Amino acid sequence: MIRRETIQVSGIRCERCVMRLAKVLEGHEGLEAANANLMGQVALAWDDERTSRETILAEMARGGFRELEPV
């Protein structure tokens, strides 16, 4: 089952940051799509049978990108 979610992350300040996030997530098993913008919003789509939200967030955190709590 494909899950979709848009999250807000810290660590995105410029176009190079967006490219760095893409590099961090590149080749992640089960990740169908990840699109970030300069406002720190990341739209994710993943196959729930092959990966999890927590695994994707952990991968992003290793690259310096952390989910921000909703306000």
Image (cartoon, rainbow, N blue to C red):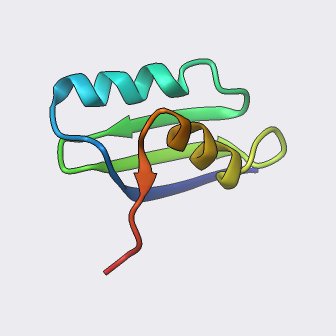
Task: Looking at this view, name the residue that lies furthest to the bottom.
Answer: 71
Q: Is residue 5 above or below residue 22?
A: below
* Residue 40 percent coordinates (x, y): 27, 49
Residue under the image location 60 percent in, 37 percent down:
59
Say left or right for 26 vs 70: right
Q: Nearer the viewer, residue 34 or 59?
A: 59
Q: Is residue 26 above or below residue 44?
A: above
Q: Residue at x 25, y 41 (%)?
A: 12
Q: Position of residue 14 (x, y in %)?
A: 15, 32
* Whole-percent x, y for residue 28 in the image: 65, 26
Number of residue marks: 0
Residue drawn 53% across the image and 28% down it: 25
Is 65 drawn above or below residue 63 in the view shown? below
Residue 1, position as x, y percentages in the image: 76, 50
Q: Residue furthest right?
A: 49
- Quadrant of the frame with the C terminus: bottom left
Residue found 17% across the figure and 40% down from its top = 13
On screen, residue 12 versus residue 45, left or right, reads left
